[in-house]
Amino acid sequence: MTSSPEIRKPQHQAYKLGIIIGLISLAVLLLPDYDNFHTRGPMNSGHDTIKCESCHQDAPGSYRQQIQANLRYALGLRKRIAHFGHQAVSNENCLSCHERPNDRHPVYRFLEPRFLKARENLGPQQCVSCHTEHKGQRVTLPEIGYCVNCHKQTKLRKDPLDVPHDRLIALKRWESCLGCHDFHGNHLMKTSKTVEQIIPAEKIRAYFQGGPSPYGDERRYTAKKEANYDE
């Protein structure tokens, strides 16, 4: 016994609607906002013992609610995309272990209007701009001359270096900055007084890729072993 056209038509419409919903849901999950969620790879240096849930926290709501919210977003009925499964990793996740007083370059400082160009070029207000996870490295920026984005006008009244900072800037020796200063200022180290004594760029690059610290092993503050968002 075959179904009448009147019965088959609603069934076909239901199948089509289900396929459309499935495709929209898949498209939403493949949006750039979810790139980090899909990315897998080795943990960055020092993170090999961290539990996944320390950074990847459950997103609000049930899967059904998350899908509904993202369908509304895809149809233009919602302004913001909803996290699916897990929330996107944010500065809060990073700072729950790594926030320390007297950081030389705290993320909030880059929100000041004067750092607009730096935000456009580097995105330093986001921890993951420099420390993208699952890359098996310590710092994931491809180069070490990024100080140029903020320090073109640096000039010291009593410059302790044998070649003054403004001279190094004129010579575009931007790779030399990290030869004297670690970016966050957390290492207990003695700053070099001569350009010949600064740490070679090759050692800094090796450190970024997970190698030994050229700044020494003594630190002012150590990172927490596990995140605690209730503190």
Image (tube, rainbow, N blue to C red):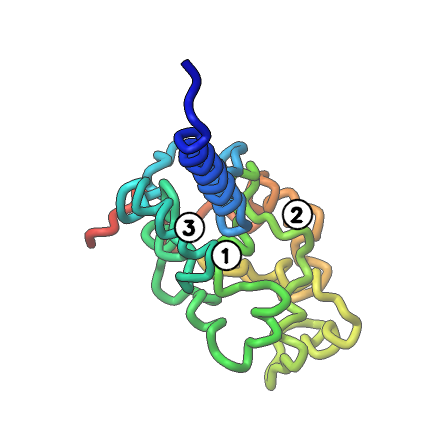
Residue hosting label 2:
205
Between marks 3 and 2, how big is the CA–CA gap? 44 Å
Q: Residues within 10 Å of mark 2 (few under 14, many from 20)?
A: some
In the picture, measured across the screen, residue 161 lies left or right of residue 88, that is right
Task: Give above or below for 146 relative to 21.
Answer: below
Quadrant where the image shows the N terminus = top left
Between marks 1 and 3, how big is the CA–CA gap? 53 Å
Quadrant where the image shows the C terminus = bottom left
In the picture, measured across the screen, residue 227 lies left or right of residue 197, that is left
Residue 139 location, x and y as percent? 57, 48
Residue 140 location, x and y as percent? 59, 48
Which one is earlier in the sequence, the residue at label 1 or at label 3? 3
**Corner quadrant of residue 178:** bottom right
Residue 12 location, x and y as percent? 46, 33
So how many labels did they put on this image?
3
Helix, strand or loop for disc 2: helix
Which one is earlier in the sequence, the residue at label 1 or at label 2? 1
The amino acid at mark 2 is: Arg
Which one is earlier in the sequence, the residue at label 3 or at label 2? 3
Do residues under tags 3 and 2 come within 8 Å of each other at their CB atoms? no
- Seen at 52% across and 34% down, the residue is 40
Which of label 1 and label 2 is nearer to you?
2
- Seen at 38% across and 32% down, the residue is 49
- Seen at 48% across and 66% down, the residue is 105
Q: Residues within 10 Å of mark 3 (few under 14, many from 20)?
A: many
Task: Give above or below for 125 relative to 219.
Answer: below
Residue hosting label 1:
189
- Seen at 47% across and 74% down, the residue is 111
Between marks 1 and 2, how big is the CA–CA gap? 18 Å
Residue hosting label 3:
71
Foreground residue among 154 and 220: 154
